[in-house]
Every structure is written in C-alpha cells, then in structure tokens.
Image (cartoon, grey):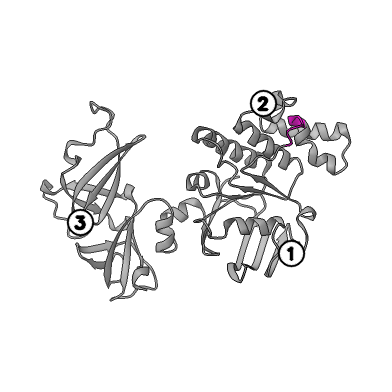
Amino acid sequence: MSRSSLPAESAVSLRGVSKSYDGRAVISGLSLDVAAGEFLAIVGPSGSGKTTVMRIIGGFEPLDEGEVRIAGEDVTFEPAEHRRVNTVFQSYALFPHMSVIENVAYGPRMRGLSRRGRRAKAADFLDLVRLTDFAERYPHELSGGMQQRVALARALANEPEVLLLDEPLGALDRKLRDEMQRELRRVQSELKATFIYVTHDQDEAFGMADRLAVMREGRFEQIGAPAEIYDRPANAWVSLFVGSANTVSGRVDRTGDPALLTSDFGPLEVGYLAPELAPGDRGLVVIRPEATRFEPRDGGSTRPANRIPAEIVDVVAIGPSLRLRAVTAGGLALESIVQRHASAPDGDAAPDDLAPGTPVFVVFDASSARAYRDEKFS
C-alpha cells in the first residue's frame, strides 16, 4: 500500500474524546480517523497522552466524553474483551509454559477453534513472521527479537480489526530494533492490516508509518505524512519537536514570498511565513541542519540576507555525515550536516575550510526557511 493511496474506510474513529485523572485533563476533545489498512504512528513527549489514546481505543480506559468507533461500530461503552482490537506491548507477555505455536494458537483456542484449525492458523502466522522452524521451541529459548515476533503473530492470529502497538521495540538493542521495524512494516503491508503504533522513537515512526499524529498536552498538533510533518511543520513547536532545527528570532518586516524579518544578525528571508504573522510581530525562523551551510568568511560572499557570522566549535562524524556546530558572538548555536569526505586521511575530517576555530557565515536559502510565531513573545 503506497502512502498516497490510503483507503477511505475508517478502521478507527474518535470524536470529541476527553479523559481526566484526579481532575487533571489528559485528553481534551480529541478527534481522529484511522483508515483501514493504515499504519499510523502516534508520537509526542512523555505525558502528552499517547498511551491514553491507545488504551481508550483498546477499551482499557473509560471515557469522560466522546465516542469511539471500530470499523464503523460504536464501541464507546464496550469492554476490551468485546472489541476486535489486540495489543502488542514492550513486554512480550508470552506464556512461558507453552511452546511458540501454542502461544500463537491461544487466541483461536479461546474462540473455540478445533485443535487442528487453531494450529493451522498459528502455523500460518508463524510463517508470516518467519518463525516456522521454531514452532516447538519455548519462549526462553528465543532471542528478544524472536519473542517479539511471536507476540506479534499471537496478536494477529486473533484477526483483530486494529492492532495496537505500545512501544513494542523499546526493550531491543538498536540492531534488533532496525530489523524488527522492517519486519513490522512488511507484515503490515502483506496483511493490509491497521496498525496504531505508539512510540517515543521518531526514527521508528518516520521509517514505518503512513501518517504521524504528533501529540502535545492531550491534543494533536499535526497529523500528516512523515515528509509533510518534517518539511512543513504546522507550528514552531512541531518544527522543534520533530528532528533537529536551527532557530533565529526576528521581527517581521514584510510578508510575501519571500517574507522578510530583521534579526540581530541582519535581514532574514523566508519562503514560508505563518499566516497569523504580520509586520511588527516576532517570528521564529526555523531551518533544518541539512539545509544550512557554513561558508568561510573570507570567501567574499555578497549574499544580502540569511548570512549569520559565527565560528565553528565542533565537528562530529555520525555515520556517513558530519555534524558541524558553530556559535555566534552572542552565544547562538547553529548546526549544519554535510557528507563526510571518504578520501580524507582519517576518514572523519571536514573540509579544511570547515575545521574548528574557522570563522564562517551560516547561510541558507529562503526556500528552506520557515517562520512561525515565536511562542516566547506570544
């Protein structure tokens, strides 16, 4: 299923959902539609309400207000056991006394399938997660990644309308997480299943999901495709929460394309100006590090705008890239990401004119810069 061709039918629909604990609102008036066959990831800081949303969908938390529909059916007051929803948690919660195939067959067994029928179904799902050869093993004989795949197969064997995944890869090391991300995406795509995935790991969310829902203080700040969230954040908070960003504060002088702001470092031109900003307002200019360049000050640049004097203080190799950090005279830190020079003697070196201690101009194109209302001045 391509990310641009999601089916229109809703597998999950929330309308005006609110939930409070001890008089404190955790979720307020939340609405959400998840398409059948969609992989939706919910991300946000700790305490933003991610897990509460998942528990409400699963029927583990009663609502204060609102409505929950699964595949068009109103299940607002239905308990978890009556909803066609299953959950995969970070803790695998496998039955240690049962073999792998018995674990996977447990749900069909509870639904009354014959022994032959449930083992056949379990075998199909073990084949899906590529664990057929381990069917007669016990959980303690498997690696963490394999146990998580068994937990996934067990949940899917119940044939839920929606599968909820709550930080399912959090207990795995980086290599296993990367492998499991690919497995989860493959399984979801093959089954055309509806996955709702809660995670604090943005790399997981961006790498797997059709859409992201970014939460803050019990509400969705933005819902959209990963590229949309990253390239066109709805506001300053989303732009700073998702990925890395350079920020420069300024005052709006001119709207239009490009818009113009005046900062302590001179004029800043931006390709996007938030609609609520008008001349005289304070704005926060946001530029991703990969769209930011450091140019030596002796290069004779005549750029009239988007040119901030600074000095490089740090160069760090991160995989195939270099992360360069520069600081202005006033202490503003700005970063740039460039490709490493494979031909450099030590393999990690930046170009000679981008070494620590080098005075540079931090430059960027107007098309790469977006200005939002600066919440410090709101």
Q: Main secondary structure of the magenta part?
A: loop
- The count of marks equals 3
* Percent coordinates x, y for residue 143 in the rendering: 61, 29
Q: Residue at x 32, y 49 (%)?
A: 289
What secondary structure is marked by label 3? Answer: strand
Q: Quadrant of residue 259?
A: bottom left
Please name which of the two marks, 1 or 3, marks the residue nearer to the observer: 1
Please name which of the two marks, 2 or 3, marks the residue nearer to the observer: 2
Which residue type does callout 3 highlight? Answer: Ile
| Above or below, 298 relative to 68 | above
* Percent coordinates x, y for residue 11 in the rendering: 69, 55
Residue wearing tag 3: 308
Q: Residue at x 75, y 40 (%)?
A: 157
Check if residue 97 falls in the magenta segment.
yes
What secondary structure is marked by label 2? Answer: helix
Which residue type does callout 1 highlight? Answer: Thr
Tell me the magenta residue range. Answer: 95-101
Q: Residue at x 77, y 58 (%)?
A: 79
Q: Reading the chain from its start, which is encountered first: label 1 or label 3?
A: 1
Check if residue 122 falls in the magenta segment.
no
Disc number placed over residue 76 in the picture, else none: 1
Cβ–Cβ under 8 Å for marks 2 and 3: no
| Above or below, 244 relative to 265 | above
Residue wearing tag 2: 141
Which residue type does callout 2 highlight? Answer: Glu
